[in-house]
Amino acid sequence: MAQTTNREGFFARVYETVEQIPEGFVATYGQIAKLIGEPRRARYVGYALHANPRPGVIPCHRVVFADGRICEGFAFGGAGVQRSLLEGEGVVFRDADHVDLSVSRWPAGLE
DNA sequence: CAAGTGACAATAA
DNA sequence: TTTATTGCCACTT
């Protein structure tokens, strides 16, 4: 048991958290990492999403950088698609590639 | 076994 | 202000 890492549990927690993001809201990698108790693994949060074992179930498009920015190369269908999805859910954009975290940031009170 | 890589983030210049 | 570098920690080569 318990090898040097609980990578499996870590990944599972990332998916669990991301799936709980409500429509019209977004979360940052660091935010999720911190929520699951590992703020230093922000990079691996993205790595977990890249693994994306459950496409269509995990709203990866609701996960963005700490600045709310979306890179053009990591969306499943393209940054344009991601932007459309977020806008369609009610997410507000400050710029073409920046989400208004002031309004759409989650958790907005930890529920 | 060691070094390099990576859907990030924070700090320095 | 933007750009560059460092740190983090697991996975890949």
Image (spheres, coloured by chain):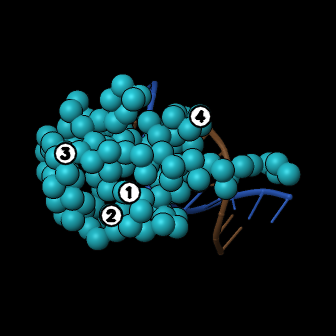
Chain colours: A cyan, B blue, C brown
According to the image, label 2 marks what residue?
Answer: A75
Q: Chain of mark 4?
A: A
The amino acid beneath tag 4 is: Gly
Which numbered circle lies on residue A37?
4
Query: Quick one: label 1, few (<14), some, or many (20+) residues within 10 Å?
Result: many
Q: CA distance from mark 1 to mark 3?
A: 14 Å
Q: Is residue A73 above or below residue A86?
A: below
Say whether marks 1 and 4 touch (CB < 8 Å). no
Q: How many marks?
A: 4
Q: Position of residue A44 (x, y in %)?
A: 55, 50
- Disc 4 or 3, which lies upstream in sequence? 4
Q: Is residue B10 above or below residue A93?
A: above
The dot on residue A91 is 3
Q: Earlier in the sequence, mark 3 or mark 2?
A: 2
Q: In the rendered view of the protein, which quadrant contains the C terminus of chain A? A: top left
Of A48 and A56, which appears nearest the observer? Answer: A56
- Label 3 sits on what residue type? Val
Residue A38 in sight here: yes
Residue A40 appears in the figure: no
Give the chain letter at badge 3.
A
Q: Measure the C-alpha gap from mark 1 to mark 2.
A: 8 Å
Do the dots labelled 1 and 3 sit on one chain?
yes
The image shows residue A50 at horizontal and vertical percentages of: 47, 62
The relative height of residue A23 versus residue B5 in the rendered view (above or below) is above
Q: Which mark is residue A18?
A: none
Residue A77 drawn above or below residue A39: below
- The answer to the question of whether label 1 and label 2 lie on touching residues, with beta carbons closer than 8 A, is yes
Amino acid tagged 2: Ala
Label disc, if present, on residue A60 of the rendered structure: 1
Whether label 4 touches label 3, CB < 8 Å: no
